Image (cartoon, rainbow, N blue to C red):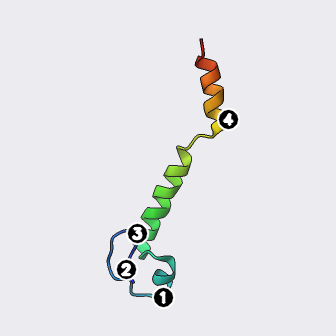
Amino acid sequence: MVCNRCNRKLKTLKSIEAGYGPTCKRKQEEADAEFLRIQITMDEELAYQEKVKR
């Protein structure tokens, strides 16, 4: 098995189960958290559209 992020060979069972090595797992979790942080909901978009509507 290889890491889903960097394609290096995974060495431990824990890493193989996770699909990431320890460093890439941390980086991926940070990237996922940032992605979720910047997402908006449909309700937020509709409220914004209504606000800027002329």
Q: Amino acid at mark 3?
A: Cys
Mark positioned earlier in the residue sequence (3 or 2): 2
The disc label shown at residue 13, or none: 1
Q: Considering only vertical position in the picture, is 36 above or below 53?
A: below
Report how far apart the C-alphas of labels 3 and 2 lie in the structure.
11 Å
Q: Amino acid at mark 4?
A: Asp
Q: Which residue corresponds to mark 2?
A: 2
Mark positioned earlier in the residue sequence (4 or 1): 1
In front: mark 2 or mark 1?
Answer: 2
Q: Considering only vertical position in the picture, is 50 above or below 7?
A: above
Q: Name the image quarter holding residue 53.
A: top right
Foreground residue among 13 and 43:
43
Q: Amino acid at mark 2?
A: Val
Q: Is 17 positioned to the left or the right of 7 in the image?
A: right
Q: Residue at x 55, y 44 (%)?
A: 39
Q: Residue at x 42, y 63 (%)?
A: 27
Residue 41 in picture, x, y percent from top left:
63, 40
Residue 16 in picture, x, y percent from top left:
46, 83
Q: Which residue corresponds to mark 3?
A: 24
Report how far apart the C-alphas of labels 2 and 1 lie in the structure.
12 Å
Q: Which residue corresponds to mark 4?
A: 43
